[in-house]
Amino acid sequence: MARNLLRTALRTCMRGGLLLSAVTFLAHGAQAQDGGTDAQVERGRYLAIAGDCLACHTAPGGRPFAGGLDLKTPFGIITSSNITSDRDTGIGSWTQPQFERAVRHGKSPDRYLYPAMPYTAYVKITDTDISDLWAYIRTIPAVNNRVVTNKLPFPYNIRTLMIGWNMLFFDRSAFAPDPSRSAQVNRGAYLVEGLEHCGTCHTTKNAFGGDTRATYQGTSLQGWYAPDLSNNTHTGLGGWSADDIVTYLRAGTNRHTASSGPMTETIENSTQHLTEADLQAIAAYFKSLPQRTVTVPAPLPASNRQMMAGAREFTVQCSACHVSTGAGIANMIPTLQHNPAVNAPNPDSLINIVLRGTDGPVTTANPTGAAMPSFGWKLHDDQIANILTYIRNSMGNAAPAVLASDVGRARKAIDAQKVVWH
Amino acid sequence: MNYKRPKADVVIVGLGWSGSTMAEELTRAGLKVVAIERGAWRDTSTSFPTTRDPDELSGSVRKDILQAPVTETYTVRNKVGQTALPMRKYHNLTLGNNVGGAGTHWAGASWRWLPFDHQPYSHVMQRYGAGQLVDGLILQDWGVTYDDLEPFYDRFEKIAGTSGTAGVINGQRQPGGNPFEGSRTSPYPTPALERSRANVLFAEAATRLGYHPFPVPSAMIGAPYKNALGLNLAPCTYCGYCQLYGCGNWSKSSPNICILPVLMQRPNFTVVTECEVIRINTTPDRKMATGVTFVDSDGNTGEQPADIVITATFTLDNTRLLLLSGISTPYDVASGQGVVGRAFTFQTLSWGFMFFENEYLNPFMNTGALATQIDDFNGDNFDHTGLGFIGGAGIQSLSNQGLPIGMAGLLPQGSPQWGKGWKQAFRKGYQNYAQIQGQGTSFAHREQFLDLDPTYKDRFGQPLLRITFDYNENDRRSGRFIRDKCVEIAREMGATQVGGDSFADRPYSGYTPWDSSHVQGGVVMGEDPRTSVQNRFQQNWDIPNLFVIGASSFPNNAGYNPTVAVGATTLWTAKAIRDLYLKNPGPLVRL
């Protein structure tokens, strides 16, 4: 349950969207007040972007950091809190130690936080960075906005349940650089494990939402599959160079693919604003992960009934943009050839993208924003299943077939449009 | 209700190609720009999704993407003394009705105009003398030359991702390109389109006749391309739904694909949609513009004050806006004095139509500007001595149509008009019909002009623009000459049934099928305030903070489509505003 709670909350807060004005605010709005030096505030501002605080702590159309974004979970609604410097409804009366405890240990002055706040990752943030982050957060202008954060029904509304969860699944150890690895890789590890909290979505979880040992090996989160980032070419990042990773996190696109779903918002709001050195560090870290062997299934034969039907549908529906060979267009339309996301053991993201479409990333480096249109209104479950089965078993890919029933379930679960004809 | 918006540095009226190109330049320079557009917002992914099959009936037949005549139309007459009547149905002008303007639905022929087209007067005088001009013809230079504009042509092509094969680079002839083109500093950003079967037959025939065929430069992107603003474009798929359709494939250069995604990210840019500007406001002494007045979609009247006013509407609307605002002197046909509405030109179209016997032209594989052309008879690329006219035409095999309704009427002569025989004839005719277009130059004449209609008004009670136009003797002579060339090539292509037509042989009508949509002039740029509204920087001679951009600035029409020339002159003016005007606001040309 906590697993779903945590990840649903993350997804929802990402999808909650971030207005341009809010980004502008983040970039220029805050002014140093008493306490932190300008340099410290500036560092804190950067850390807040890396941690993507704004995404969850701002309601759609709301004032930056004033909270109020509803995170809809299967257990009920958690609403993000007001973290502006308002003394009454925000965190203006907090001290730095109280801030530190909330961010790194999930315990505010008066209550336990739910892991929708990714303190399980933020625990890795260093003392200096916490101090800088606090210096910046204090400069956020006060907004009086009272938020009732806990709207969960019994028993999930009992916050002290989190004491037990923390004991079981919260690894409180601080970030420890590995002296056997380069400073760059250690910097990357620090960002990935801490502020960027990549594992929150991409690490496979146990039944209670605690991290398993399958670090960055991908997991399903309510309608999406956060893909495998481990070092293998079939489903992971093994085929991407460090530059491919940097370009993707900076532009939302690279020579292989374009971002989709919640990752697009992460890129737009957070990673595109990181320095070149930090992006290189993140890439170096992922490239330093040990090689992982994954079992590659035998692709379905071209004579398979689904494959034959899917090949026809692919020509009619997909080939104009993705090109008849599936090669796509670099920095714009993903290639379907040898595509690790296509090979994902779980086809949730593929089904989601075909059913609902996905906005293209809009970044400073690549403002194109070419979107994948929605096919939910147009294609029946079996047509989508056949297309995906074909793509997953041709063009150098190999992955289990997608069934019409998978598409049907997803169509309901993600509230995609019904087909407009029969 | 009346209201006033906060003052901007610049207000731009109309957000088509010229407006968005200008807005990009000026916002990049740090100015606060507000654009006011009559049409609604459109973007590529959501307005033209590739999942939705285009519909010929709503697109090509009902022309849903165009501005309806009920919104604004023009009255037309052929001569002074006649009563002009409003065009109440769709006509030859294809006006945009959305953010992106006509640049969203255009066919996309992407020409640099010839050096001759920018300096026709000096050129004709030098080569032939005044005796070459028919009576009443108006011929004047632009005040800006091809060489002045070359860097801006280059930049605009790199925004648009124009596809084509260069003919002359740094003075060196290039194989496969147009040998008559002005020298370029770089090749086309993307390679030329594939040729249609009709294009191939045309190229072979033209070569046999000693002419120089080349692919028409096109807005249909030839290969994946990252444009000058960092936007990605995808190659054209020849889907066959191009002119009169928006492209959801990121394959047709348009403001929506090539500029707006960048512009919309800029905090110093605002677009106000579904608002029609009805007047340019000036100080009481008419020495400076102060902004514009518009009517919004609720019927309220708003004012947008600005330090610089730029109008970037359709050619005819640019003229109308000046006339409605009482800016500069209207042209008076009786005396020949005055400038606004003067030097109005259309185009002179000629055609060769043909049917083959046993071809498979597969016209369904087409796109807007899928064409192969010869320029051997365009501009002043040939000796006009003794011909009695100036100018000519780009002569092209144009493969821009293959849709069933549009093709249904194109049957060989003598075909049955109904039943089984008609079906057989259509089936055969579909694969065997081809056309050659002569897109002819047009030069202004003292009896062709624009003014405000004395009778008919628009929905806000303002007078419509009146077009007084008929083909002049120069048009008639050049039209027949070009028609004969079209027919000559059609015969050489091996067609069994060939017809030709020169539209200039009949009085002008706005309803002629297959006619040009390119009108130019009315607010022309030039070297002399007695014969131009604006100086060589498209800056009003009387009001230095008013710039009217677009094809309304061109005192003559080329044997080409105008968009890239509009883009180049817009960039030229943007640079002048940025580098000269902002440093020293005032007239950029002093006489």
Image (tube, rainbow, N blue to C red):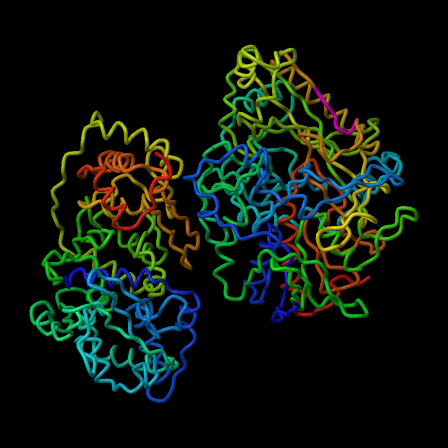
Specify whether B245 is left or right of A359.
right
Quadrant, the N terminus of chain B: bottom right
Q: Position of residue A388 (x, y in %)?
A: 26, 38
Mark yes or no: residue B376 visible.
Answer: yes
Identify the magenta region: B500-505
Position of A80 relative to B409 (above/below): below
Residue B240: x %, y % from top left: 50, 31
- Taking depth in this image into account, of B74 and B24 the one nearest to the observer is B74
> Which residue lies most toward the front here?
A154
Q: Is residue A10 left or right of residue B469?
A: left
Q: Nearer the viewer, residue B321 or B591?
A: B321
Magenta run includes residue B587: no
Taking A331 as reference, is B381 above or below it? above
Nearer to me, B543 or B102: B102
Q: Is residue A200 in view from this perspective?
A: no
Can residue B503 be found in the magenta stretch? yes
Q: Position of residue A228 (x, y in %)?
A: 19, 51
Q: Residue at the location (59% across, 62% down)?
A: B26
The percent coordinates of residue B417 (x first, y second) are: 62, 14
Q: Is residue A319 above or below residue B537?
A: above
* Relative height, residue B214 to residue B539 (above, below): above
Residue at (53% x, 36% y) in the render: B242
